[in-house]
């Protein structure tokens, strides 16, 4: 398959805690093509953030990547040492997180922090760097770049901070931008602005975006292809239109039905009974079985493999 | 005429800004700047707004948990800010609150049981055994098992903790509950569970809700009337379906358009409605607060601040566009 | 529907204990402290010049626990020595801390006196064992007094804020400014010397650190939602302070308290060394050291053993306190 920029093969990540092994990610396969926006949707504990962190080998202790391969530019990112990884991080693959306030150093001015990226990765002189930084700030539609350059993070609003984060992530023209719930902590009107910004940047630079969220509706705006995750596994993969028109996996269907206003139904909310599983005691068979409306004996007899049910539409379900 | 349970008149909550060594008050953050609301028995009124709108401050003020600058909140005719200590205690049984973050709203050092029986024993002065029976009844009502009584909050998931929070709010048999973003920090599949529970409880126990949220889709499902707050003032108030079908205020239109939806007909078109990051809360009263973000601004919007203008019987809007 | 498997029951205290155990040094220090406590409690039956049980003329006597009028002033060791009519069980160390033996003064460690004797012939090992009682009781009681005063003042200052906080904080600062040791010496010079005076004095001047900690915790916790919820339920202020906030504020106080105990023990030893501690003949490690002062050139056993006792005890408490602090700190989780 041409055009594949990043390929994750058989990734498994577990956390070894006092309570047992939490299998956060189990045998995950994922691809990102050039210029494509790939969305990962799932609820807390499904493993989407850990998947993102694994790409740049940023999984925190006590997590360990047990197996798997992440192919990028003909290299396996998981086998690179720290020095070679630093060439990739920030330069070729960047990541932005949910809480911009936590990702920005509160005692450094915005200009200083953004310059750091250039100081570290390039050989440019000071004034040239300042030029580049101001240009970056303009690129992310910050209205007064000079003022923001001299401001501290706490003097900016949430939306501005997130724009600064995006600027920092795109400073060196990476090929892939990983966005881990970038708008979850923002107001809805600001969220739509940030989405607009990402959309325009994607078009301008032919950027690939890996967009992680728990909000299906967001992905319906911005994603090209969507992966649905549950309990550390991918349970469905399809192009956006296909997924929303014909969801195949019961979890996907249930998730859509639980959104108020789905198919214009504002009278009744179909909720999913039960709780989100912890990934310590994983029983054989389908992990969604206990909460599934359609569950049958065949679902818990053996582990279910993901397969291509219709063209480019993959699902992990035998129903 | 429907029965009014709560009447809020011109409530203002100002936070003083103190500067200098002597901590002189140099100005005020006007968190709530003149809000009038009538809440009718049995309804679910939504208070919608983003950060800085003052909705949380308003919720706390209604429960007399923070001091107000001026205005009144009348519960069943009596102004709660004029109540004596004993009357206030009685009031506490009638108005309750459920918070956004279930984990931080439960005392981590107390068992669920003791969280529930404490208010019973304190207010109603009943025996412990009776209180325990009552607590277990409420636990079952919110969908939790008896054995939750002896466990600690951290042993439960987010959705279950929120059920415990709801149980605590219900234990004194209140009439009016303020729900401050009760499902915002929960997963989507759990949100639906809790919303359904709240609706059922409202029918069973004949409750009145004030539902605070920034999520208009949930509000559309849950509430019958919506009030939109912007920077401490109500900018539009209308019955739910009317607000969605005929939004009048530019901010309401912006909000509605910003909601990401799967509904094909309401997709965000990426080049409509101008927007920008919002201004600060320091300003004087001489112009409309939404002026700088408004797509439809007129010269008079910069000089005067509009009042709430009646568009139809139940639909009010604070905008000069209605003057035509 | 199949039943969901839930996370195993999680207990905060058990969790802290597992984290604590990971620090081996602190874990063994805890053993040492328990050993010392047992030593202090059982001192009379570990080291005494009277037998624990004695059978004389077909009657059972317990001289350690009771004063018998028929045996007043009797030297039990001589009494039971070659008397075949008597059956007696002596404690393992057959000396009392106040037993004079002017024939055996300043003897270095030997078979008869395992840690030697002091200038009145008193057995050092016995004195050290009984000294444990003084150190531990002063440590715990003084810290207890500090905790009571500190928690009360800190809680009120933190919860109410405003003018009350300003007044109380200034009060705390004034107490901090006093040079503790000199003040204690001054008070002791006026008052009657007794173990209780020592305990109270150390307690009264040691509460400021705890007060500040508690105040900080209250300032943080009073804005937590569960406190607001308690207010919304109409609970009284006192109830909220002591029933809701305080249990959550105690964790850093616990750490501080262990350091307080160590400090109190050290302070008591210092005072005894200066001759101002518990009055003789009650044995205290510091008073043994005081004696050593006069015989420093040859009586090394008067220095090493009490010194080691103080050192090990204080270090043990400090290690436990540090390990507890690390166990509680979420950033140091492994």
Image: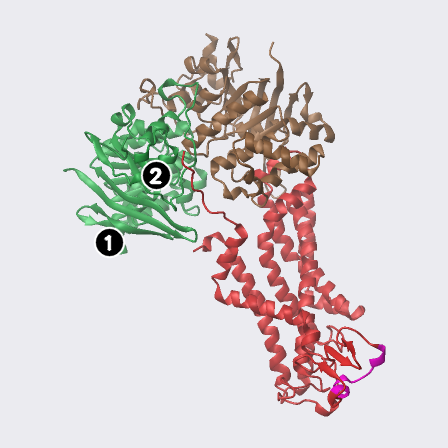
Chain colours: A green, B brown, C red
Numbered mark located on residue C334 in the image = none
Label 1 or label 2, whichever lies nearer to me, is 2
* B279 and A191: which is toward the camera: A191
Residue B152 found in image quarter: top right
Numbered mark located on residue A80 in the image = 1
Instruction: Find numbered disc 2 in the image and state the secondary structure of the residue it sits on.
Output: loop
Numbered mark located on residue A287 in the image = 2
Residue B78 found in image quarter: top right
Residue B202, position as x, y percentages in the image: 55, 22
**The C terminus of chain B: image quadrant:** top left
**The N terminus of chain B: image quadrant:** top right
Residue lying at 82% horizontally and 76% vertically, measured from the top left: C68
Question: In screen coordinates, is A227 left or right of C153?
Answer: left
Start-end of magenta stretch: C69-80
Residue C52, above or below C113: above
Between the residue at mark 1 and the residue at mark 2, the CA separation in whole angstroms equals: 33 Å
Instruction: Count the numbered circles shown.
Output: 2
- Whether residue B60 is visible here, answered yes or no, is no
What predominant SS class does the magenta segment belong to?
Answer: helix
Q: Is residue B21 magenta?
A: no
Question: In screen coordinates, is C112 left or right of A48?
Answer: right
Residue lying at 25% horizontally and 56% vertically, measured from the top left: A81
């Amino acid at each position: 398959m041409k055009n594949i920029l990043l390929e994750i093969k058989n990734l498994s990540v577990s956390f070894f805690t006092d309570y047992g092994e939490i299998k956060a990610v189990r045998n995950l396969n994922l691809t990102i093509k050039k210029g494509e926006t790939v969305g990962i949707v799932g609820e807390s504990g499904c493993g989407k953030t850990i998947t993102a962190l694994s790409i740049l080998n940023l999984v925190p202790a006590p997590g360990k990547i047990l197996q798997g391969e992440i192919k990028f530019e003909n290299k396996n990112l998981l086998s690179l040492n720290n020095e070679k990884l630093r060439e990739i991080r920030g330069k070729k693959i960047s990541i932005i997180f949910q809480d911009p306030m936590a990702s920005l150093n509160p005692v450094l001015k915005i200009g200083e922090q953004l310059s750091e990226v250039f100081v570290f990765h390039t050989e440019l002189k000071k004034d040239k760097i300042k030029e580049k930084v101001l240009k970056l700030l303009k690129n992310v539609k910050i209205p007064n770049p000079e003022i923001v350059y001299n401001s501290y993070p706490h003097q900016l609003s949430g939306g501005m901070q997130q724009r600064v984060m995006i600027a920092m992530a795109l400073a060196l023209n990476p090929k892939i931008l990983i966005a881990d719930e970038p708008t979850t902590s923002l107001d809805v009107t600001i969220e739509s602005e940030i989405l607009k910004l990402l959309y325009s940047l994607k078009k301008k630079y032919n950027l690939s975006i890996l967009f992680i969220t728990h909000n299906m509706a967001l992905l319906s705006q911005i994603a090209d292809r969507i992966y649905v995750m549950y309990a550390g596994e991918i349970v469905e993969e399809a192009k956006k239109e296909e997924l929303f028109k014909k969801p195949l996996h019961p979890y996907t269907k249930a998730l859509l039905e639980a959104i108020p206003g789905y198919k214009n139904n504002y009278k009744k909310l179909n909720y999913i009974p039960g709780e989100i599983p912890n990934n310590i005691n994983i029983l054989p068979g389908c992990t969604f079985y206990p909460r599934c409306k359609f569950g049958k004996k065949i679902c818990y007899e053996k582990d279910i493999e993901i397969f291509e049910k219709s063209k480019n539409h993959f699902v992990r379900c035998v129903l | 005429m429907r029965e009014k349970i709560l009447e809020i008149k011109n409530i203002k909550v100002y936070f003083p800004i103190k500067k200098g060594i002597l901590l002189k008050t140099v100005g005020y953050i006007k968190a709530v700047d003149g809000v009038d609301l009538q809440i009718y028995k049995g309804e679910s009124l939504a208070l919608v707004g983003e950060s800085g709108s003052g909705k949380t401050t308003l919720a706390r003020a209604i429960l007399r948990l923070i001091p107000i600058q001026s205005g009144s909140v009348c519960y069943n005719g009596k102004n709660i800010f004029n109540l004596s200590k004993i009357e206030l205690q009685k009031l506490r049984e009638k108005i309750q609150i459920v918070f956004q973050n279930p984990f931080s709203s439960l005392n981590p050092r107390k068992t669920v049981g003791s969280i529930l029986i404490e208010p019973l024993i304190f207010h109603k002065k009943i025996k412990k055994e009776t209180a325990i029976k009552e607590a277990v009844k409420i636990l079952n009502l919110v969908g939790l098992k008896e054995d939750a009584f002896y466990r600690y909050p951290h042993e439960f998931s987010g959705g279950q903790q929120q059920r415990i929070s709801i149980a605590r709010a219900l234990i004194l048999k209140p009439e009016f509950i303020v729900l401050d973003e009760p499902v915002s920090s929960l997963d989507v599949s759990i949100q639906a569970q809790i919303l359904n529970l709240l609706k059922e409880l409202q029918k069973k126990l004949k409750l009145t809700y004030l539902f605070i949220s920034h999520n208009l889709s949930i509000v559309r499902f849950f509430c019958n009337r919506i009030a939109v707050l912007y920077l401490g003032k109500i900018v539009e108030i209308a019955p739910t379906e009317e607000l969605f079908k005929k939004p009048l205020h530019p901010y309401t239109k912006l909000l509605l358009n910003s909601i990401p939806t799967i509904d094909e007909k309401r997709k965000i078109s990426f080049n409509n409605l101008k927007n920008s990051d919002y201004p600060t809360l320091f300003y004087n009263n001489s112009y409309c607060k939404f002026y700088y973000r408004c797509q439809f601004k007129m010269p008079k919007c910069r000089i005067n601040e509009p009042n709430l203008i009646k568009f139809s019987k139940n639909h009010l809007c604070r905008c000069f566009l209605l003057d035509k | 529907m199949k039943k969901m498997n839930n996370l195993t029951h999680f207990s905060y205290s058990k969790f802290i204990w597992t984290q604590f155990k990971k620090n081996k040094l602190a874990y063994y220090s805890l053993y040492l402290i328990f050993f010392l406590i047992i030593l202090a409690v059982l001192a009379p039956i570990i080291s005494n010049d009277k037998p624990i049980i004695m059978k004389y003329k077909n009657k059972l006597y317990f001289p350690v626990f009771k004063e018998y009028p028929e045996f007043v002033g009797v030297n039990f060791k001589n009494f039971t020595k070659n008397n075949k009519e008597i059956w007696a069980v002596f404690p393992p160390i057959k000396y009392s801390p106040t037993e004079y033996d002017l024939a055996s003064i300043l003897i270095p460690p030997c078979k008869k006196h395992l840690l030697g004797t002091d200038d009145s012939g008193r057995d050092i090992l016995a004195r050290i064992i009984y000294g444990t009682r003084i150190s531990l009781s002063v440590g715990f009681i003084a810290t207890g007094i500090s905790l009571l005063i500190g928690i009360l003042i800190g809680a009120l200052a933190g919860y109410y804020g405003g003018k009350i906080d300003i007044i109380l904080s200034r009060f705390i600062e004034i107490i901090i400014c006093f040079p503790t040791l000199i003040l204690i010496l001054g008070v002791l010079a006026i008052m009657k010397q007794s173990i209780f005076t020592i305990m109270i004095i150390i307690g009264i001047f040691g509460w400021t650190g705890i007060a500040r900690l508690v105040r900080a915790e209250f300032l943080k916790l009073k804005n937590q939602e569960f406190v607001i919820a308690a207010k919304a339920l109409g609970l009284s202020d006192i109830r909220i302070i002591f029933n809701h906030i305080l249990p959550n504020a105690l964790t850093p106080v616990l750490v501080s308290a262990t350091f307080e105990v160590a400090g109190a023990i050290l302070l008591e030893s210092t005072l005894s060394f200066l001759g101002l501690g518990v009055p003789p003949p009650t044995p205290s490690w510091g008073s043994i050291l005081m004696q050593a002062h006069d015989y420093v050139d040859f009586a090394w056993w008067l220095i090493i053993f009490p010194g080691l006792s103080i050192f090990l005890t204080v270090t043990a408490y400090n290690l436990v306190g540090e390990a507890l602090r690390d166990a509680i700190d979420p950033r140091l989780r492994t």
